[in-house]
Image (tube, helix red, strand yellow):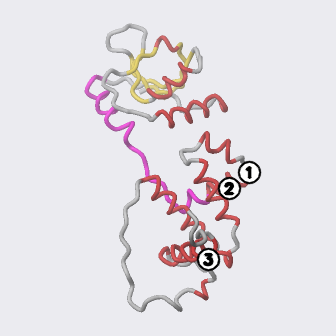
């Protein structure tokens, strides 16, 4: 395994034929925008090509290679792993699938910091979050705690017996709800539980956002 960073002409790189990693068109568009804007990307991981002398086979970075070719780059940065076919298949099955899960609270802090200094339109081109999600997060982050619902008001009308609410969200929806709850929790010196944070959001919506009767 050679940790040295190299650069090679793109014609010297070939995707591994058994690569199963797929990136949606929208995510590819954002990856392309990021590389075009910054010129930065994670180096590709390759191995010496098992059949074509002088060429390399990509183990990790197939989508980056597609984008680099699409935007007219002539070369790519890469690191070499000297592995056999079996090891290559093992890496294909793991490298593109191993990923940590984000801590919602930390992502909320990160996004708020980005929103304070960057344009939402630009961020929506770079981040997996869409423009509407970013706009709503920015709006929530600007609310004063008492604009949502003072904690002193909570609990007075609550039923004495806890009720379990069950509903399913897709991954994107769950992230959006978690980010909103994180913002509400961190808006208080004494953090409410997530259930109370959800209640605060619900009461704020009922007070300020529901349409007038008879209107769509």
Magenta span main SS: helix
Q: Which residues are magenta?
A: 84-109
SS for dot 3:
helix
Q: Measure how far apart labels 3 and 1 are at the Cα level.
A: 31 Å
* Residue 73: assigned label: none
Label pair 3/1, CB-CB below 8 angstroms = no
Q: Residue furthest front?
A: 214
Q: Nearer the viewer, mark 3 or mark 1?
A: 3
Q: Position of residue 120 (x, y in %)?
A: 68, 48
Q: Which residue is mark 1?
A: 117
Q: Position of residue 196 (x, y in %)?
A: 51, 78
The answer to whether residue 185 is visible is: no
Question: Vertically, is 31 above or below 115?
Answer: above
User: What count of labels does the image hold?
Assistant: 3
Question: Vertically, is 77 above or below 115?
Answer: above
Specify whether 152 is left or right of 10.
right
Which residue occupies the foreground of this view, 77 or 133? 133
* Residue 113: assigned label: 2
> What residue is at 48 percent from the left and 33 percent from the top?
25
Q: Which residue is mark 3?
A: 207
Q: Measure how far apart labels 2 and 1 are at the Cα level.
A: 7 Å
Disc 1 packing (10 Å; few <14; some 14–19; many ≥20): few
């Amino acid at each position: 395994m050679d940790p040295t960073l190299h650069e090679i002409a793109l014609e010297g790189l070939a995707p591994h034929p058994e690569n199963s990693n797929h990136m949606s068109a929208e995510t590819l568009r954002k990856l392309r925008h990021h590389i075009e804007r910054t010129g930065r990307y994670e180096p590709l991981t390759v191995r010496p090509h098992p059949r074509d002398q002088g060429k390399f086979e990509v183990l990790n970075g197939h989508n980056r290679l597609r984008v680099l070719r699409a935007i007219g780059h002539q070369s790519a940065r890469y690191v070499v792993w000297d592995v056999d076919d079996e090891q290559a298949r093992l890496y294909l099955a793991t490298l593109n699938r191993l990923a940590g899960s984000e801590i919602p609270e930390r992502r909320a802090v990160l996004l708020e910091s980005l929103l304070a200094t960057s344009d939402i339109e630009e961020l929506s081109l770079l981040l997996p979050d869409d423009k509407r999600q970013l706009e709503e997060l920015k709006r929530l982050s600007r609310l004063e705690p008492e604009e949502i619902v003072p904690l002193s008001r909570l609990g007075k009308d609550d039923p004495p017996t806890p009720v379990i609410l069950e509903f399913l969200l897709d991954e994107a929806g769950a992230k959006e709800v978690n980010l909103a709850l994180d913002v509400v929790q961190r808006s208080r010196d004494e953090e409410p539980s997530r259930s109370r944070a959800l209640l605060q959001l619900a009461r704020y919506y009922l007070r300020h956002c529901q349409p007038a009767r008879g209107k769509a």
